[in-house]
Amino acid sequence: MNTQRPEIRKGRKYDQVLAGAREVFLRDGFEGASVDDIARAAKVSKATLYSYFPDKRHMFMEMAREQCARQAEVMLQEIDRTAPATKILAQTARGVLQLILSEFGLKVFRICVAEADRFPELGRRFYETGPAMGRQHLAAYLREATSRNELKIDNFELAAAQFQELCKADLYLRLVFGINVSFTEDEIETVVQEAVSTFMARYGA
Amino acid sequence: MNTQRPEIRKGRKYDQVLAGAREVFLRDGFEGASVDDIARAAKVSKATLYSYFPDKRHMFMEMAREQCARQAEVMLQEIDRTAPATKILAQTARGVLQLILSEFGLKVFRICVAEADRFPELGRRFYETGPAMGRQHLAAYLREATSRNELKIDNFELAAAQFQELCKADLYLRLVFGINVSFTEDEIETVVQEAVSTFMARYGA
DNA sequence: TGAAAACTGAACTGACCAGTTTATATTCCA
DNA sequence: TGGAATATAAACTGGTCAGTTCAGTTTTCA
């Protein structure tokens, strides 16, 4: 998936720049963020920014890529792969929801959706390092569980995609469109359990 | 749901204006669309635009609201409510997919997602006239079918939301992030059938 | 038919912004 | 320690855009 190493990094203030970019992009969105603001937030001159990145878009893309990688790593560590399927699925569902319901997850999603047709590379990269990556890991698990007769699945990729979608039921659109700003543990847990139940009703052995 | 009648309509060129707004907003997005372009496309002066709408946002909102209502109406007419559940669900799934995979559906979704936090009313209205409306109709059907023992459901709203999400599996994110521009009938039909199968596995009587 | 309502075009205001340039200053390391 | 790499501040270019204003024209309808 790692298309190629861009190796854009040059100087000692690179991390400051990414931090400033993260702060401003997440606060103001892509169009809303001004490069001058980012330079100010990063305590760096505009010329320095432009020595690291060819333009604002690449600045955003690097910031998003780096954060996604970080978040994904956290999520994978938390999962206990020896437990029974219902437990693993519930853990996975909680992980997915924690990520996509977080402020970071939501803001990056918004920006990537908005920019995906003016800036196709951004959309593609987000899809691949985000949802597609998660789905692949999940599909791999589903294949394992099927091979030891814990689950019964033909189309692993689609089943994984279905599970991901089931996790969002009710909650995600309400968040994305600003009906709710956050949810209680109970609301989340209900959706998690219902997602697992529906999934297991179809795919349980 | 109809918060209040705005009754903004004033003059004889109102429909031209909405048509121009639709053309330009869907082509260029919200930020990308310029009011001068809309005026040009609508063959109307800018001053006339601003006599109908207080600002660009309200222009967009009216356009979107009117289109959503139109699309929803079409969808509801197509459904044969006397058929067995699997058939009705499959029809519904096809309807949902046709709408959300359409150029219009996608573009409006993109714009509403992007603007939802700068312009909360837009997000709310889209959610209510779009996904929430669809879910309500579906939940009402699920209640009927449960009462005649065709289905077995406790939480109608959540089940409806689950079904809506199942319809999107795999396809929707690939469209939103520009991995695919369109899908074959076969791809769609597979997702429809799998959505229905999973749903019925859990909720079939 | 004539006055009121709606519309026009074009200029204007006031603002914002991506990306470049340049002369100068700081930091690094061989 | 001195040259190379890196960073800075600030001005500048060339552009975009929402929304207003106004003098003048067209349409409507009583």
Image (tube, coloured by chain):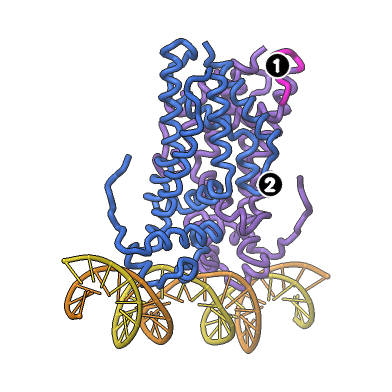
Chain colours: A purple, B blue, C orange, D yellow
Q: Are marks 1 and 2 in contact (CB under 8 Å)?
A: no
Residue D29 vs residue B46: left or right?
Answer: left
Q: Residue at x 41, y 49 (%)?
A: B66
Few, some or many residues within 10 Å of mark 2 (<14, 14–19, 20+)? some
> What subunit carries mark 1?
A
Whether residue A93 is situated above or below residue A27 in the rendered picture: above
> For numbered disc 1, what is the local secondary structure?
loop
Question: Rounded to the nearest whole Å, what is the CA distance between mark 1 and mark 2?
Answer: 29 Å
What span is colored magenta in the figure? A147-155
**Which tag is nearer the camera, tag 1 or tag 2?**
2
Q: Residue at x 60, y 58 (%)?
A: A60
For disc 2, the marked residue is: B179
Residue A113 in the image, given as x and y percentages of width and height:
57, 50
Residue D14 in the image, given as x and y percentages of width and height:
59, 82
Can residue A33 be seen in the rendering of this structure?
no
Is residue A149 highlighted in magenta?
A: yes
Q: Quadrant of the C terminus of chain A?
A: top right
Q: Residue at x 71, y 25 (%)?
A: A141
Looking at the rendering, which quadrant does residue B89 occupy?
A: top right
For disc 1, the marked residue is: A152
Q: Main secondary structure of the magenta part?
A: loop
Please name the amino acid that badge 1 sits on. Answer: Lys
